[in-house]
Image (cartoon, grey):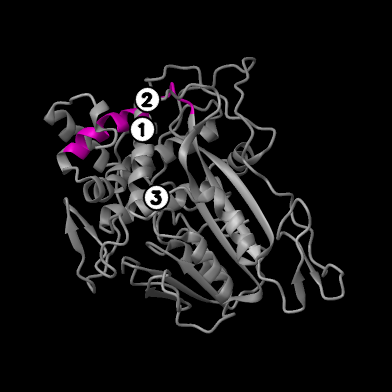
Amino acid sequence: MVGFSKTTPILEEQVEGLATQASQREHTPPRSSRQSLQSISTALTSKESYIDADSTSATDDDAFYSDRGTTTSVTSNVWKFDKENGRTYHGYRSGVYYYPNDPKESERLDFQYNVIQEALSNKLHFAPINNPRTVLDIGTGTGIWAIEMGDAYPDALIEATDLSPIQPEVVPDNVQFIIDDASEEDWAVPENHYDFIHTRIMMGSFEDFGQIIRRGFKYTKPGGWMESQDVMHPPFCDDGTMPADWPFRQWSKDIEDAARDAGRPLRTADKLKKWFIEAGFVDVHERAVKLPINTWPRDKSVKILGHWWAENLLSGLQGFSLALLSRVYNWSKDEIEVYLVNVRKAIVDRKVHAYHKFYTVWGRKPLPHEVVTPKAGAPGALATTSSGKEPPRPVPDPDFKCAEPFVPDPQLSDAPTDLPPLPPPSTAEEEFVRD
């Protein structure tokens, strides 16, 4: 069993207590009145920025991991779900997706969506779409993005697919949820159908996500756009504080190995741009932000974001692990729970200045009169017309790749430690700020 031999034995009651504590983490940032959106976005994306570590106690952070109220997701009883290790999984195409679909996971997905929106300054998309009529969201999960798009573009038809019917029953009239598998070659619509195709966090969902992008190109209208967003696996660290045997790092390797052996690779985010270009998209752009793992950054707004991201990892850790480690490596549920104890502790260890990269890639399908002629140094990124002249288009922002190291500034004073608690859950009446 990969990595299990390194786990320190833990008393059963300790496992039970920590597992219960993690299961109660259902914190959701608000959909409106978001705190310091611009400062968070600037801190995470600027090429000149770094995330400075907070020099206060690495363990004095209990307030960031306290329990609070929950929200309940409404799940459909149309499909009979598979039950395994106390969690439920999709019944349609049983076994091809390794992560749960129960209310606990639905709440985590809603929370994760809000955290990502916070990191992205609440942008629903980066592709410069203009009055789209047909939009497809692949792997919609609980459907929040599709619903928000339906509100933002009331004249568009938003179709959203997933393997599980876990979306809300009351949605805008222009939003339609469909139980479908995007790995099917035929998407049951004509070619060149969609103005915009969107995916978010599809790592581990498909055997070949590059193939999904190629099919997306097929079903995108000429002049239309496709955009994909995903978390880069495994974690990164710029200042040498992440030990080789850090339990969360080891867990990331074990999960990555299991997903690869299952034929559902996790490491896809940094390949998105390459796959977009190979599929035939032009004007392909890549953007990345850094998501700190826990509250180690000094900057207060980024510290709060790190808290939220750690909460997302903690609440999802069991769901990320159970099916992969039990089906692929035949671990028992008890073995997995014991293994995850030290992983949970590692996630909240502020001595380790680790982070994830979150990539966004978008590209345009060429118009019929355009012939793709890649230029040296930017394969597939430009297209020319049959006359040899570049078609007129807006000049995009320069590509940004999150490759700069974090260099703590010793001249900065310590940031205050009296950070506010997480805000209350959002309500249905609240709206997202959109630009």
The structure residue drawn at horizontal position 17% and vertical position 43%, both measured from the top left corner, is: 333
Give how far across and how far down residue 177 sits, in percent.
39, 74
Name the chief secondary structure element in magenta: helix
Q: In screen coordinates, is 325 left or right of 347?
A: left
Q: In screen coordinates, is 409 left or right of 390?
A: left
Query: From what the image shows, is residue 277 above or below residue 135?
Result: above
Q: In screen coordinates, is 364 left or right of 338?
A: right
Confirm whether the magenta stretch covers residue 219: no
Mark 2–mark 3 distance (CA, rounded to whole Å): 29 Å
Residue tagged 1: 250
**Amino acid type shown at disc 3:** Phe
Task: Kindly check if marks 2 and 1 are in contact, taking CB atoms under 8 A apart as contact.
Answer: yes
Q: Looking at the picture, tell me which residue is in the foreground, 269 or 166.
A: 269
Give how far across and how far down residue 388 sits, in percent.
86, 70
N-term mark: 2 or 3: 3
Mark 1–mark 3 distance (CA, rounded to whole Å): 25 Å
Residue tagged 3: 111
N-term mark: 2 or 1: 2
On-image quarter of the C terminus: bottom right
Give how far across and how far down residue 141 sits, in percent.
38, 62
Query: From what the image shows, is residue 26 above or below residue 62?
Result: below
The structure residue drawn at horizontal position 63% and vertical position 41%, both measured from the top left corner, is: 45
Magenta range: 335-353
The structure residue drawn at horizontal position 32% and vertical position 56%, both measured from the top left corner, is: 106
Q: Quadrant of residue 256?
A: top left
Confirm whether the magenta stretch covers residue 351: yes
Residue at the outermost left position: 12
Q: How many neighbours does mark 2 have within 10 angstroms: few (below 14), some (14-19), or many (20 or more)?
A: few
**Amino acid type shown at disc 1:** Gln
Residue tagged 2: 245
